[in-house]
Amino acid sequence: MTDPFIKKLINNRLINVKDYIINHYVELELDEVATMLLLHIYNLSEQGIQFLSINSLKEKMSIDFVRCADLVLKLVNLNLLAFDIVVDNNGKTKEKFTLEPLYQKIVKDLMQENNKIIQVNHENEASELANLIESEFGRTLSAFEIQMITSWIESNFDIQLIKLALKEAILSRAYNLKYVDRILLTWKQNNIKSVEQALEYTKTFKRYEAPKNNVVNKNEEVYVSWMK
């Protein structure tokens, strides 16, 4: 039986199976004839037909019975089509076809494609953020600092929240990412997920403490009172 979640996606037309087959038939290792046959089988499935008839299929194609049967077997071997053994009311055994293997492949491919897009977006966001921080700090970031920025992105910290934490660090004249990380950790521990929440949270605390003798080293951490 087709996975209920996948079936729901397909039934609600959230996944266009026909478009996927047409646009990816080369990756599916199909030629144009096999692709057309698979589309016909999908149409039968959409019509609620559960049993394949090679004779009926070949009438929809410009191929003979043997060629049609060979292509159906090819679809099975490529894990795009499968058959389940069922027993009807008369006790006769029949082979019910299912396109679940195809649906599983489509969902897997779409998820992989989505993950690639997310990865590229993360890389772009990390690069943009690194450039901003280098500009604000007036120095090149280390590989460890780049990794720290990447970890913020992958932990789904809001970009604007990271920028606000950076602003807090600069106001405290603490030009290092450990300080920014400490701010983000504090916010996370207090379930702060937006800029508005962070601003409201900091209102109840002294923003930062002036360093003694008004001398600050750029690599020295100056701790905001609400972080202690």
Image (cartoon, rainbow, N blue to C red):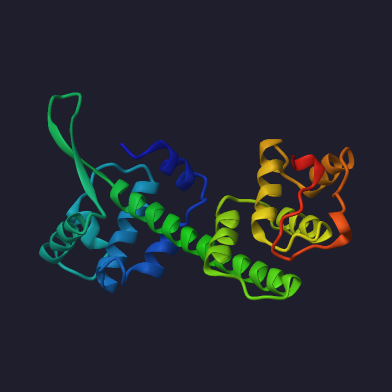
Where residue 96 appears, as percent x and y from the top left, is: 22, 40
Front-most of residues 41 and 169? 169
Front-most of residues 92 and 165? 165
Where residue 47 appears, as percent x and y from the top left, is: 38, 46
Front-most of residues 113 and 58? 113
Quarter of the figure that contains the N terminus: top left
Left or right: 214 with respect to 60? right
Q: Residue at x 37, y 68 (%)?
A: 24
Task: Place residue 28 in its image quadrant.
Answer: bottom left
Task: Place residue 170 in its image quadrant.
Answer: bottom right
In this view, 225 is above or below 38:
above
Q: Residue at x 18, y 55 (%)?
A: 55
Left or right: 15 with respect to 66? right
Left or right: 191 with respect to 146? right
Q: Residue at x 67, y 48 (%)?
A: 182
Quarter of the figure that contains the C terminus: top right
Front-most of residues 83 and 209? 209
Left or right: 44 with respect to 179? left
Give the farthest residue toward the left: 66
The number of discs equals 0
In this view, 9 is above or below 75:
above
Where residue 90 appears, as percent x and y from the top left, is: 15, 24
In this view, 31 is above or below 97:
below
Where residue 141 appears, as percent x and y from the top left, is: 61, 71
Task: Place residue 54 in its image quadrant.
Answer: bottom left
Q: Residue at x 37, y 63 (%)?
A: 21
